[in-house]
Image: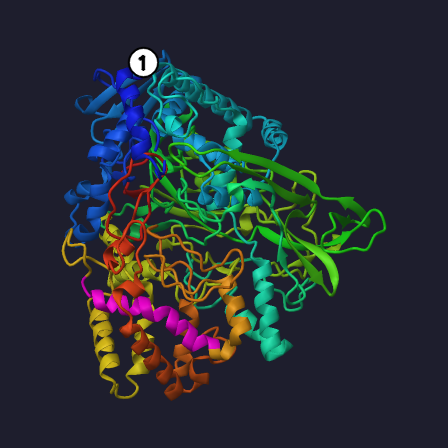
Amino acid sequence: MRPRTRPHRLRSAAVALASALFVTAALTAPATAGATPSPTAAAAPDYCGGRCTDILPPGENGNATLAEILLNRMFGSRPAHTDDQLGPYAALASGYPGLTEAGLRSFFNDASFGVPADQVASTASPRPDVTIVRDKATGVPHITGTTRYGTEFGAGYAAAQDRLWVMDLFRHVGRGELSGFAGGAAANRQLEQSFWQAAPYTEAELQQQIDALAAHGGRATQALADANAYLDGINRYVTEAYNGRTFPGEYDLTGHIDPITNAGSIAPFKLTDLVALASVVGALFGSGGGGELASAQVRSAAEARYGKDAGDAVWRSLREADDPEAVRTLHDGQSFPYATVPDAPQGQALPDPGSVVPERMIYDATGSANTATTKANGVLPGNLLTAKHGMSNALLVSGAHTDDGHPVAVFGPQTGYFAPQLLMLEELQGPGISARGAAFAGLSFYVQLGRGQDYAWSATSAGQDITDTYAVPLCTTDGSPVTTAANSYLWHGSCVPFDRLERKDTWSPTTADSTPAGSYTLVMYRSAYGLVTARGTVGGAPVAFTSLRSTYRHEADSIIGFQELNDPGAVHDAPSFQQAAQDINYTFNWFYADSRDIAYYNSGSNPVRAPGVDPGLPVLAQPAYEWADFDPATNTARYTPPAEHPQSVNQDYYVSWNNKQADGYTAAGFGNGSVHRANLLDDRVKALLQGGGKASRVSLTQAMESAALADLRAEDVLPDLIRVLRSAPVTDPAAATALQQLEAWLADGAQRKETSPGSHGYADATAIRVLDAWWPLLADGVMRPGLGDQLFTALTGALQINESPSGGQTGASAGGPVSANESIPHKGSAFQYGWWSYLDKDLRSVLGDPVAGPLARPFCGGGDLTACRNVLLTTLSQAAARTPAQVYPGDADCAAGDQWCADTVIQRPLGGVTDDRTTWQNRPTYQQVVQFSAHR
């Protein structure tokens, strides 16, 4: 069926309003095709018994024509199913305490297979061998094919209907060419630069990854056939939408198509686009490690402060590589040693203090490329990749501990909030494919997170260390003196030139982005040891610091694992699920539930390192310290076998919120210590099961949502602070009042929740403001005197001080071009990264409590309780004196001093249609609640 057409005169009339309404507009994507309702084909076997539900805000429809975009700006109207999931999603924050089994459907949608005949909203058949049915409730496409090709063609067609603009954006992001496509706004440039730095490829290299995959045969051959069919479906829709003028209006607003004459085009999609899209997903959610330079700078500063041995001890304790108090997903004592910190490290390459300079990436800048700020906002946050952020959570309880003997799972990915969403929902039914759930726009030929006939699966970002930093000796081929500017390096005794990878970006002003014309060339240098990220000296010798990621040049390899997860013939129980997860090379924690079992597996291409190498520090670029069986031509090496990856079946329960996986599985970065946001989940599930308690879909959802509203600092660190302060009478009236307010908030549950639904004001608002203001002052007052300025600053470069819901109150910055204290406001996800453990361990030590894995030296008041208390009192009084406007200074979306608004979740507009803000929650973007009642 052809997409519905709208009167061309409406499109033409809209042009007159476009300039006035879209001076600084950010940018959305596609609409569902209308059709006469008709009965659907028989649904695939479904063993969930109506107890599989899910939700993905803001809505399935991500397409809006130019006229619809303008109507949204003028009158607030939106196309159907654009934002219909925002209300139910947001309402759980106030509705969860009284949740019932029947009430789950008020907050989650039925995720059963198929669509009842009376719930069919539209039916389309873009080919005779596929039918796309959309349901009335959500507009989700249910795609049923009689052939494999038809099924995948339908998946592509539906994806383009719902996310064409988003798909186009991200294939350009993945190539480092967003500015030329969407405009030269500073944020667009910052984003394309960060992705070009992480995954630069020539077009030939993108194709090489496809060719390498094809050479595997078998499932890889089928996967590429599926991808080609998917592309055919996308391109069919593109042609029809262009001819019918029903394509997303953002193409008009960005100057790609003339809104009056229809002159212009939408470039066809091709296989290399899918590789570029996959590289974006992998860089955002599936990588780990790479922070070795920041770690080295912390170590050097610690040695300068305390001397070598004492400094190394301080650095190790701050690093918390395998902290005994860290919450673990596998808590039955299982050990999976990986990236272990050696007692006598070999091949370390610590940079000389002050020598490290980030690699230049921008060349030949013209026009507005020379300006750091622009009036236009850009389509995505510029620091989307560089700002640290955690993704996804999972709660699973085995059948032995549930109400009816069947496992329960509440899980989903925390991928941020965008309008339209990066993810889309779909159901795929065809030969060898039977699944429903979420997939990234442009990669939805398979469901990536969702359910099959009798099982469901999800993932959290794992982030184990698969990226190493090498110190590569520089050299010259003409005998001239070697400096850090040299563009050749030593490889096994030969002086060879770096590969130079270039991307030329040029932009001009458009209706959507008023940034004046400009251009630049992005350049990355590449060695056999990876991409050059910085230069400096080691022992006085010039080196390039390179980043070597095991999944670089292998962005498409995970396609096999996702294919298996969608295949009911491949996955039929916990062991076969774990086998499928093994075929995914990105770093994820995978979770599984069916009617009998729950299971876990940690995926990723974990390189086998040379004996004695410390993965947490830069390594000398010498053959002795290379990965085992390393081949730079293909970027392959020997990887740890599946048996050495953390895994389990039927532990009593699993929780994950991007925390430590298991004993011995070394954390890649700083911050995995005694206080982690996964404690919020772990504590609640433990409480559910205490004394033989049984979990249900309702109680596990309540546990998740209770954690979603909790302030981690208040729940897990504030009790320490109160004990120190109450160790003597508090006589200062302002401090006493603030302390009483904090104690009352803690007694109320330490949550950030509205006084009533829609009140737009927090209960315990003053206490929340005080803690928000207090935290960075605390970190500074407690830690800086002992660390000294140099080490304090270096540590902020390795781990941010705070990650509050508002993205503010960040504290001091490392001062470099990229700070660990960068934040993204209104993103929902919070409390993943911060100095929570440092303060918790230090305060407990001051109080005389036992501390496993303590910091190497006391900090608060030098270890003296009275002096420490004085620091807390002073900083608390300072915090209490801060006005709301000082704590929440306001932004383009919120007035200064508006606490609730500062915290709110905003669906960041990727297109022209905007959505309402919603109250803060720290929960998955896409979320499933499942409990299967039967099995094949």
- Residue 873 drawn above or below residue 357: below
Q: Confirm whether the magenta stretch covers residue 407.
A: no
- Residue 457 drawn above or below residue 846: above
Observer-nearest of 362 and 551: 362
Q: Is residue 610 left or right of residue 402?
A: right
Check the image and name the residue furthest to the top: 128
For badge 1, the amino acid type reads Met
Which residue is at 47% across, 48% downward? 385
User: What's the colour scheme?
Assistant: rainbow
Q: Quadrant of residue 252?
A: top left
Observer-nearest of 195 and 336: 195
Q: Quadrant of residue 737?
A: bottom left
- Residue 340 drawn above or below residue 927: below
Would residue 437 be seen by someone viewing this image from the given angle? no
Q: Main secondary structure of the magenta part?
A: helix
Q: Position of residue 439 (x, y in %)?
A: 39, 35
Which residue is at 24% across, 41% downward? 86
Quick one: quadrant of the N terminus?
top left
Q: Position of residue 271 (x, y in %)?
A: 53, 26
Would residue 576 be seen by someone viewing this image from the given angle? yes
Observer-nearest of 379 and 839: 379
Q: Is residue 513 left or right of residue 929?
A: right
Q: Confirm whether the magenta stretch covers residue 767.
A: yes
| Disc 1 secondary structure class | loop
Which residue is at 36% across, 69% downward? 775
Magenta-drawn segment: 763-784
Residue identified by numbered label 1: 1
